Image: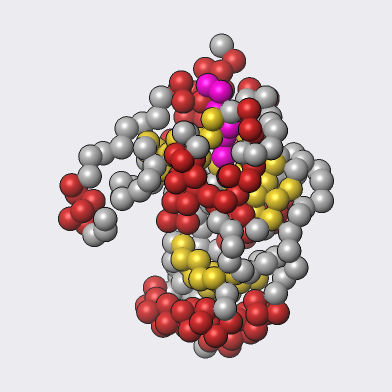
Amino acid sequence: MSGMADIDRLPPLPVPPLALMEGASLFLDFDGTLVPLTDVPEAVEVDPALHALLRRLHVALDGRLAIVSGRSVAVLRNLFGLRDFTLAGSHGLEFAQPDAAPHAPQRLEAVDEAQAKLLAFAADKPGLLIERKTLSVGLHFRQAPQWAEACRELAERLARETGLFLQIGKMLYELRPGGADKGSAIRHLMREAPMSDGIPVFLGDDVTDEDGFAAAVSLRGNGILIGPERATKAQWRLEHVDAVRHYLNESVAHLTS
């Protein structure tokens, strides 16, 4: 189901009840869910209040909290200070337990080849941003939407030439190894303690999070969409990042009362 006409016919998703968090294994997307989207990926900030909230949630859920992101484990830890949490990075290609070394494949030469071609393409197009990730490379056109079609054509061609998987996000084309997504990350973590002791609840905003919603629902859990109404596999919705903060703060109070 797609298109505005289809979305207009969808019933609005309800706000998730606090009871949803009872016995939950909580999976949280990062960008657009815990923090607002920014034009430059490095401009995101994790404020002390968010760190404190995540720590309280971790305790209230007996450790059943994981962050599932397209960001690499290294960035989540070193740039945003999330070393104390279970992490699934690079769309499920990397995993790390608190303070332990991450488990990840080697960066492919094909990613470096794609990155070189993307850099050459963006060199004379102000506003385009090439993001080098641990295992992938991203082409951001949020600041130069006039190049959207050219970006799409190039990304699709490079995916064909290199055999890399083309991940489409919000104003972003990312070339990465295939074989994993946020859904496979959730299924993997749900096979291990402490996450296996709960019912999965996944919060996410992007189309890249739909695999995560599908996995949570298939495991008799719940998906919570963040942002505007759209066709989705999630059963609940929160309007924006501030609503997520409010809901998670209220959930801690509910779980510890």
Q: Is residue 9 left or right of residue 163?
A: left
Query: Where is residue 188 shown, x and y percent of the image?
Result: 63, 46
- For the question of whether residue 136 can be seen, the reply is yes
Q: How many marks?
A: 0
> Magenta region's main secondary structure?
strand
Q: Residue at x 49, y 45 (%)?
A: 215
Q: Quadrant of the C terminus?
A: top right
| Location of residue 142 in the rendering, given as x and y in whole percent from the top left corner | 45, 67
Quadrant in the picture for residue 150: bottom left
Residue 122 visible within the image: no
Instruction: Give above or below for 130 relative to 98.
Output: below
Q: Measuring from the top left, give residue 48's x and y in whole percent.
A: 66, 37
Image check: 189 left or right of 22? right
Provide the residue span drawn in magenta.
22-27
Q: In percent of the image, x 73 and y 64: which residue is there?
A: 105
Q: Nearer the viewer, residue 182 or 140?
A: 182
Q: Position of residue 64 (x, y in %)?
A: 64, 31
Judged from this view, the residue extending furthest toward the top is 257
Residue 102 among those drawn in magenta: no
- Which residue is at a point 63% across and 22% down the rendered structure image? 60
Q: Is residue 13 left or right of residue 102?
A: left
* Corner quadrant of residue 195: top right
Is 69 left, or right, of 192 in this rendering? left
